[in-house]
Image (cartoon, rainbow, N blue to C red):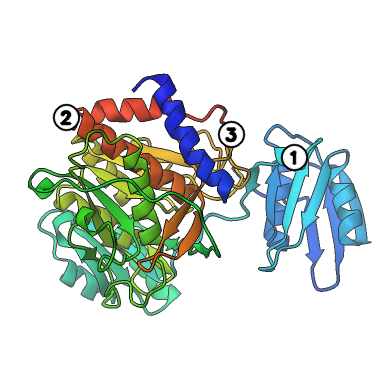
Amino acid sequence: MNRSDWMRLFRGGLALAWLATAMPPATADSLHWRKDQNRVDADIATWDLQQLLTELAAATDWQIFVQPDATRRVNTKFSDRTTGDALRLLLGDLNFALVPQSNGLSRLYVFRTSVQDATRQIHARRPKPIPRELIVTLKPGANIDEIARLVGAKIVGRIDRLNLYRLQFASDQATEAARKFLEGHDQVAGLDANYPVNRRPGPEELAFSSFPALNVKARAGGHDSPIIVGLIDTAIHAQGSPYADFLLPAVSVGPSDNAGPGGEALMHGDSMTQTLLRGLAGVQEGPEGSRVRILPVDIYGSRTVTSSFELAWGVHEALSRDATIINLSLSSDGTMPYLEQLIHHAHQQGVLFFAAAGNSPTTEPSYPAAYAPVIAVTAGNSTGDIASYANRGAFVDAIGPGSMIVNDTQGAAYLVSGTSVATAYAAGIAAGLAERNGNRLTAVEDSIRRNLAPKTVRK
């Protein structure tokens, strides 16, 4: 494909979118925010802007976004001021906008001239792991049952082939005691937290749609030598789907409630399946159809939140079934060393990974997108720029359409949006290119990184 082909493919997707390092606190300085009284006291002489906003985020629970190159030395002292007065005194000649949100988490934007420049999020604390849980990687030959007994843990997840286990404890004290014991244990190779991975919002139903039907078909006999895309997501509706010929038997991991989609409501996995096939359709050639197949791996079940352990488990199951492209239309704030190691090893074997950059207009990394082997995909708007809601951090590698119209098994139309859409679309393009070039995935990765790179990535 030449450059004009890439632009045609991307613009075609974008038409669908149009349709629809905190510093430690200084002991001499203080900030007292009395939220219940709307009153603020401050005595600050040494903080810079980063320190101030970090403390402010912790004190207020606001989501705070700042212009990346904004700077300020804070030197002020006052007492019993209102929120507005306090912000003016604290921020000086910088502008700000405080925006209430329906979920109760107000957003504060700090900038010089334009609120659109406030793109970097300030985190008050490190990402919160799932409480009372630890992820343990054992050395070969170690016995997890014996180790769990020693620390008083319940084994709630296990991937024996990776020596990776999810342990649950009765209290915070028991968790901390187990952490200290396991950190020095000679049979433990790794010890990590378990982080939540939220399920993306479902699609919005449309009253009418003139959107063209998906023009793609599966080649008869394509199961003999397929190009397999592992779709790590929710369950999907395979029965009655017009795209059933593309689907391999589904896999479920995690608790026993992972028993299929249930009901008629369109699932996130359904939307990503159709979006992936839309990307495939853009590069498919010839009338005989495609050998690409999709392996659905459900890591959510009936839950709205899964964990990084189930995510790693789902990736492992897809890889063990010969998936060579992995689609991760999801993200988490927490780092996952055991998943990063799994991804690095698989990438060395030629597997391609695509992951969503995140639906926050910040430059903060999200995971697993920020891991080096992963192609991190953000969402674009109708002009080809990064969408206003999408992450634009330096870790971002590619851009795709941020919205897509999809259908349920009854033909009703829905609009689904976000960087998860862009990710699935890019993975579909990669699958089509792999089929065209004889499954030379290194060349496919080079093409995606070169031709789908965002025009600008602001740091």
Q: Position of residue 444 (x, y in %)?
A: 29, 29
Residue kind at label 3, given as amino acid type: Asp
Q: Are the residues flagged by discs 1 and 2 in contact, CB closer than 8 Å?
A: no
SS type, badge 1: loop
Q: Is residue 46 left or right of residue 199?
A: right
Marking on residue 385: 3
Q: Position of residue 219 (x, y in %)?
A: 16, 45
Q: Which residue is mark 2?
A: 438
Q: Position of residue 99 (x, y in %)?
A: 77, 57
Q: Is residue 17 above or below residue 307?
A: above
Q: In this figure, what is the number of numbered marks?
A: 3
Point 49% across, 47% down: residue = 419
Camera-near label (1 vs 2) is 2
Q: Which residue is mark 1?
A: 48
Point 48% across, 64% down: residue = 202
Q: Is residue 357 left or right of residue 239?
A: right
Q: Are the residues flagged by discs 2 and 3 in contact, CB closer than 8 Å?
A: no
